[in-house]
Image (tube, rainbow, N blue to C red):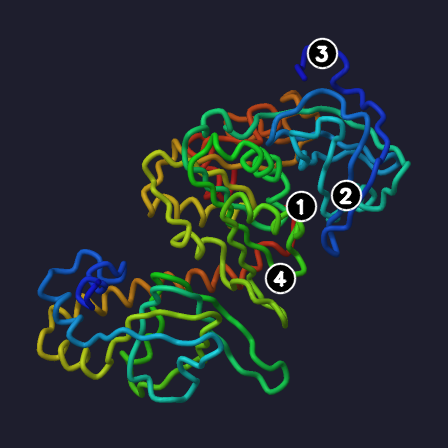
Amino acid sequence: MAAADPGFLAPRPARVLGWRRETAESVTIALEPAGEPWLPGQFNMLYAFGAGEVPISISGDPGRPDRLVHTVRSVGMVSAALCRLRRGQWVGVRGPFGSAWPLPAARGRDVLVIAGGVGLAPLRPVVYELCCHRGDYGRVTLLYGARTPGDLLFRPELERWRRRIEVLVTVDRAAPGWTGDVGVVGSLLPRAGLDPAGAVAMVCGPEVMMRFALADLRRLGLPESATWISMERNMHCAVGLCGHCQLGPAFVCRDGPVFGAGAIGWALGVREV
Amino acid sequence: MLTIADVVARCPLFDGLPTRHRELIAGCARFARFDAGTAIFLEGQPADRFHVIREGRVTLEVFSPERGRIVVQTLGPGDPLGWSWLFPPYRWHLDAFAREPVAAISFDGACLRGTCHEDHELGHLLMERFGGLMLQRLQATRLQLLDVYAHGSR
């Protein structure tokens, strides 16, 4: 939605079609009407009436344009209100906004998707697309790290995706009965069998995690020009006017949230902007 | 069929080492297999060897009387397993279990230490490799301690 559109500040009403608890802190909600077409990586501003508005990445299936799906972690007043929404209730939606993951550029190439924590939500549309059009891409690997097994998002989907792509999951702290991997997400990289020539990486998670992941990718020989990350900042207007999300020369809402690592990777190591 | 020297030559841990050093290392190595659930080593036992995993996954664990077996890390193909063989008192600090059938190359610690005493250049190169590995695992542990997923909306 362009800033020139006078309606960009007016939320449109959307009804909660369904919801699913993902973890103790996270909920996925499906809204209708779906509104404007969107691209994997873009976000909407969701307005919880009486609480406020927050940017939330779209986490749905691009192949299901009839519903608008977001995954929200309850970390503040507004996100907690969104997590309490139930079927039939209403929210305000503005968007979609921002840049998209470079799926067209990834066609024909090996794709490495690296997600940490709730960072899998903005990447889930990418994984849906990769699984749906599996033949259009080379080797596809998802590396996913979370705090504990109970913090893993989309567990049913993770199992389904294993039939189409390689999925490696690790947790920082194991729990009894956990038979998967334990360790940081970067420790899975050697097992991804990455051939840096011609591969593309898409990374999303906490900034510290992304900083370490980018360093690991560099060590393996993947150039920054083949690496994309999704940044998160305090986005308010969502169209690059208010300046709340300014990061050096970039506005995360307008120029991001998906950036080439070469363009924004510097920001991951900066103490003050 | 691959010989032990072929497999040692393909180990990432020994990548770039001169052929003569890889041959010396291969002289202390043998193939090993562990069934799923097998204890590869246990805390406090003599650390007389180390392994490089070729297939399967291994858990590094600490046993706690209150909490039972606590997995602190998993290792997979290509990963070296064990460095206590390098440092006195040559005792394991953790337990290691084969989570699934594991194929590995197993290196005799005393043999390698003896070879390193005779060939200090090899000793230096091996210490450099294991030092790098320790640094990498220390950094990963620090990242785990940071608990990066605990806060924030992502």
Residue identified by numbered label 1:
B153
Q: Quadrant of residue A68?
A: top right
Residue A251 position in % (x across, y down): 57, 26
On the same chain, marks 1 and 4? The answer is no
Q: Earlier in the sequence, mark 4 or mark 2?
A: 2
* C-alpha span from label 4 to label 2: 21 Å
Query: How dense is the environment of label 3, judged by Cα within 10 Å: few (below 14), some, or many (20 and up)?
Result: few
**Is B140 on the left or on the right of A72, as rendered?**
left
Q: Regarding mark 3 in the picture, which secondary structure is present there?
A: loop
Question: Of the residues tagged 1 and 4, which is closer to the observer?
Answer: 4
Q: Residue furthest front?
A: B1
Q: Quadrant of residue A49?
A: top right
* C-alpha span from label 1 to label 2: 9 Å
- Residue A28 or A261: which is nearer the viewer? A28
Residue A105 position in % (x across, y down): 45, 26
- What's the mark number on residue A148? 4
Chain letter of the residue beneath label 1 in the structure image: B
Residue at 54% in and 82% down: B63
Q: Regarding mark 2 in the picture, which secondary structure is present there?
A: helix
- What's the mark number on residue B24? none
- What's the mark number on residue A79? 2
Q: Residue furthest right?
A: A88
* C-alpha span from label 3 to label 2: 27 Å
Give the amino acid type for the residue marked by disc 1 in the picture. Ser
Query: How dense is the environment of label 4, judged by Cα within 10 Å: few (below 14), some, or many (20 and up)?
Result: some
Residue identified by numbered label 3:
A5
Chain letter of the residue beneath label 3 in the structure image: A
Q: Is residue B142 above or below residue A97?
A: below
Q: Is label 1 in contact with label 2 (beta carbons under 8 Å)?
A: yes
On the same chain, marks 3 and 4? The answer is yes
**Is B83 on the left or on the right of A272, as rendered?**
left
